[in-house]
Image (cartoon, coloured by chain):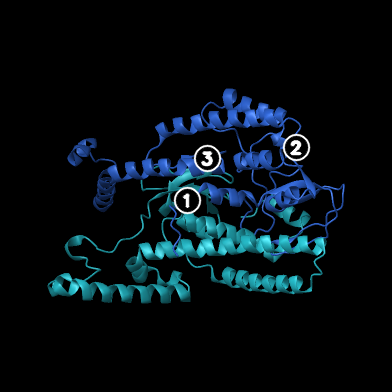
Chain colours: A cyan, B blue
């Protein structure tokens, strides 16, 4: 719930432009993806906006450099624009590569439980890569095994072959809104999470709060 | 192609985040406002101060187009006061951080570092911001001539860093797997440095205690089924040994 100081602030401060808000969101998404133990949902709306802005800025830079009369002033402007462009690209690339690292690490787990969290390209990559791997394993050694032992996702004997992320792993979070008491395991007294606090907690106990934006990973 | 880095931000990534903090510059040349992807920048008119992201301020500084005005908490008096708080008043916790600003739009997530102005001319002087160590180091390296007493500031930052690292190390004794651990006031680099160790200890303790926790859950479920609460004898713990 918004408290009175929030309402006052929204009246006295002009809202920041959407591209600034997107920079904040992209930075937060980057940090979250690098810190969370499991794969987070693909921020598709944010990525579409970001990529189209980057494309636009690239063409602006190209126009500017074509028309620049090599005056020092517009030359410097160009340097600033390009530097910023590189910073955005770095964030986007880092975010996507962090996601690929997780997809490569837990391919079967993601295929079985999390395919909705992938972008179209990621899903295509994961399926094609997994099909290639299975064909290769089959051809090089699995084919020589008894038929019952050839599966890569066997769950016989109560032990699953499919590796998943440790959802109880400890993470560092910053609380962005008062969220009250968060209980980590049944029976304990819980933690009183107040705005501005930094906590080390189990990922499973704050995952929902991170998705809602009440808490961010740091 | 996949990022070959461990989970959690590396020091280079933390420094990259820190470069998005706003700092105050005093321009030495005019520069029109620029339409950057992250929003427009204010036009630069000497000698009026303007707030710019650190990466841009550094670019201007390197080309001698502007001076950077160090944030108020980076002057020796403030640092000495903070150091006093760290040594005398709070001997276990870190010195209290500045509170997060109220959210501007209730529908949007609350702003947080590096996007709260904590290194500008009018930032609070009595608290270390989240990126204090990186900001201090970067500014001392790139703009030491904008400080009145850079060596004193450098020395105070080193003292602060040592006493806070000591607290971080001592804090390892209270880590446990059950409840969360509160670390208000911790800095970005300190999180980065402590992450592997702290999460390692907590995860390790959790795995050691996993069977105990599991047994407790089962016992509770059983009690709920039977309708008895709190009558289970305590000595059941021995069964796990």
Task: Say if labels 2 and 1 share a chain.
Answer: yes
- Viewer-nearest of labels 2 and 1? 2
- Residue A199's place in the image compared with A148, above or below, is above
Residue at 52%, 40% (x, y): give it.
B190
Residue designated by label 1: B8
Question: Depth-wise, is mark 2 or mark 3 nearer the camera?
Answer: 2
Residue B42 place in picture, x, y as percent: 80, 57
User: Mark 2 sits on what residue?
Assistant: B145
Res. A136 image quadrant? bottom left
| x 39%, y 72%: residue | A126
Earlier in the chain: of badge 1 and badge 3, it is 1
Is residue A189 among what the camera can see? no
Instruction: Look at the image and tell me in which quarter the N terminus of chain B lies.
Output: bottom left
Label 3 secondary element: helix
Disc number for residue A76: none
Image quarter (top left, top right, bottom left or bottom right) of the C terminus of chain B: top left
Earlier along the polypeptide chain: callout 2 or callout 3? 2
- The chain identifier of the residue carrying mark 2 reads B
Q: CA distance from mark 2 to mark 3?
A: 27 Å
Q: Are marks 1 and 3 on the same chain?
A: yes
Identify the disc placed on residue B190: 3
Spatial CA span between label 2 and label 1: 34 Å
Residue shown at the point (69%, 33%) measured from the top left: B126
The secondary structure type at the circle numbered 2 is: helix
Q: Nearer the viewer, residue A199 or A78?
A: A78
Mark 2 vs 3: CB contact within 8 A? no
């Amino acid at each position: 719930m918004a408290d009175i100081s929030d309402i006052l602030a929204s009246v006295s401060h002009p809202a920041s432009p959407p591209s600034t808000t997107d920079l904040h969101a992209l930075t937060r998404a980057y940090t979250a993806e690098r810190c969370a133990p499991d794969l987070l949902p693909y921020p598709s709306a944010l990525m579409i906006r970001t990529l189209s802005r980057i494309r636009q800025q690239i063409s602006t830079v190209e126009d500017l450099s074509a028309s620049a009369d090599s005056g020092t002033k517009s030359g410097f402007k160009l340097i600033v624009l390009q530097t910023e462009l590189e910073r955005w690209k770095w964030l986007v690339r880092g975010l996507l590569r962090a996601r690929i690292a997780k997809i490569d690490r837990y391919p079967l787990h993601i295929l079985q439980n999390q395919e909705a969290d992938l972008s179209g390209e990621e899903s295509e990559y994961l399926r094609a890569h997994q099909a290639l791997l299975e064909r290769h394993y089959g051809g090089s050694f699995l084919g020589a095994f008894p038929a019952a032992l050839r599966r890569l996702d066997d769950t016989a004997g109560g032990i699953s072959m499919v590796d998943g992320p440790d959802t109880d792993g400890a993470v560092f979070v910053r609380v962005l809104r008062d969220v009250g008491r968060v209980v980590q395991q049944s029976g304990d007294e819980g933690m009183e999470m107040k705005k501005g606090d930094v906590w080390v907690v189990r990922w499973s106990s704050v995952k929902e709060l991170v998705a809602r934006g009440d808490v961010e990973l740091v | 192609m996949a990022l070959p880095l461990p989970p959690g931000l590396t020091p280079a990534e933390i420094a990259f985040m820190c470069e998005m903090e706003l700092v105050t510059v005093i321009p030495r040349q005019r520069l029109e406002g620029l339409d950057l992807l992250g929003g427009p920048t204010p036009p630069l008119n000497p000698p009026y101060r303007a707030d710019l992201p650190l990466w841009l301020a550094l670019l201007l500084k390197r080309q001698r187009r502007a001076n950077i005005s160090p944030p108020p908490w980076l002057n020796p008096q403030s640092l000495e006061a903070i150091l006093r708080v760290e040594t005398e008043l709070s001997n276990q916790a870190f010195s209290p951080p500045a509170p997060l600003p109220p959210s501007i739009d209730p529908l949007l997530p609350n702003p947080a570092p590096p996007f709260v102005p904590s290194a500008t001319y009018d930032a609070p002087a009595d608290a270390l911001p989240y990126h204090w160590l990186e900001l201090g180091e970067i500014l001392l390296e790139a703009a030491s001539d904008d400080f009145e007493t850079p060596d004193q500031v450098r020395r105070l930052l080193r003292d602060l860093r040592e006493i806070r690292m000591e607290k971080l190390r001592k804090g390892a004794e209270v880590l446990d797997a059950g409840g969360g651990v509160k670390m208000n006031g911790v800095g970005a680099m300190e999180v980065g440095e402590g992450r592997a160790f702290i999460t390692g200890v907590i995860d390790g303790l959790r795995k050691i205690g996993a069977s105990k926790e599991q047994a407790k859950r089962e016992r509770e479920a059983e009690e709920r089924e039977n309708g008895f609460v709190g009558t289970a004898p305590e000595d059941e713990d021995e069964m796990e040994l």
